Amino acid sequence: MTLDASPDHREDAEPVLAGSDLHLSFGPTPALRGASLSVGAGETVAVTGSSGSGKSTLLHCLAGILMPESGQVRYGDHDITALPDKQRSALRRTDFGFVFQFGQLVPELTVDENVALPLRLAGVGHKEARRRAAHWMERLEVTGIADHRPGEISGGQGQRTAVARALVADPVVVFADEPTGALDSLAGEQVMTLLSDVAEESTTAVVLVTHEPRVAAYADREVVIRDGSTQREQEPVR
C-alpha cells in the first residue's frame, strides 16, 4: 500500500492518516472521549498531555493496534477500523514504522539484524534486506556497532537503531511513543533531530507522543490531549 503525497502541498492535500471522534474504554474507565488527529506527508505531529491523558491509547488506535469502540481511522482510502486483524498487521509490517520508549529491540539479534527485521518479515530477501538496512544504519550513525547485540550498546545507540528499523521499510507513517523517555538530554536531542530530519526528507508522516515540551518542539504541530479528548492544535514553541 503506497500513498503519494508531497510535503510541499500538505496544507491543500488530504491527510495521510486521520482519526476522528475516537472513543475507547478499558472496563469502566474511559481512555478516549472523542479524540481526533490527522497528519500529512512529511509532517511531524506531537501529541502531548499529562500521564494517563490518553496519548498512547490514541497512538495505538491510529496504528490499528487497538480498535476504538466508535469513531473512524482512515489511512488513505482505507478505513483501518473496518480492516480485519490480518490486514492491520500487514500494514504495520509494510506501511507503518514504530519507535518506542525503550527501543524494544530483539535481544538475540545483532544491530544490523534488528534493523533488517521488518524487511525480512515482509518477505524481502536476505541480501536486499541487509543492503537497505546498511543504508539506514549509516544514516543513523550506527554502522560501527552493526555486529553488537542490544545489551552491548548504549541507550542512545539503541534508540538510533530503533529509528533505523522504523524507517528501513520506507514507511508512510512512523509512530513514536515517548522515544526519548529513557535517554539523557543529549541523546534525546540526537534521536529527535535524526528522526525529524530523516522523516521530512523521506516525506514520512510522524505521530509523536511525548510529555516533554523540548521533544514536542521538534514537531510541526502540537495536539494537546486531556482526559481522552483532543483540546487544541498549535505550533510548538521552538
Image: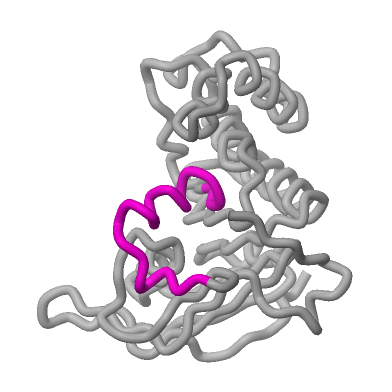
Q: Which image quadrant for residue 57?
A: bottom left
Q: Position of residue 12 (x, y in %)?
A: 80, 84
The correct choice, above or below, for 56 with respect to 38 in the image is above
Q: Identify the residue shown where x is 77% and y is 31%.
A: 139
Residue 202: in sight, yes or no?
yes
Query: Which quadrant: the N terminus?
Result: bottom right
In this view, the residue in front, 191 or 70, is: 70
Count of marks, rendered view:
0
Chief secondary structure of the magenta portion: helix
Residue 227: in sight, yes or no?
no
The verdict on residue 79 being magenta is yes
Q: Which residues are magenta?
A: 78-97
The correct choice, above or below, for 131 with respect to 78 in the image is above
Q: Position of residue 145 (x, y in %)?
A: 62, 14
User: Would residue 135 be found to the left or right of residue 213 on screen?
Assistant: right
Q: Position of residue 154 (x, y in %)?
A: 54, 24
The verdict on residue 148 being magenta is no
The correct choice, above or below, for 56 with respect to 25 in the image is above
Query: Which quadrant: the C terminus?
Result: bottom right
Q: Identify the residue shown where x is 44% and y is 66%.
A: 59
User: Would residue 231 be found to the left or right of residue 197 on screen?
Assistant: left
| Residue at the extreme top of the image, as rendered | 147
Q: Which image quadrant for residue 216?
A: bottom right
Q: Position of residue 118 (x, y in %)?
A: 50, 34
Q: Identify the residue shown where x is 43% and y is 85%.
A: 35
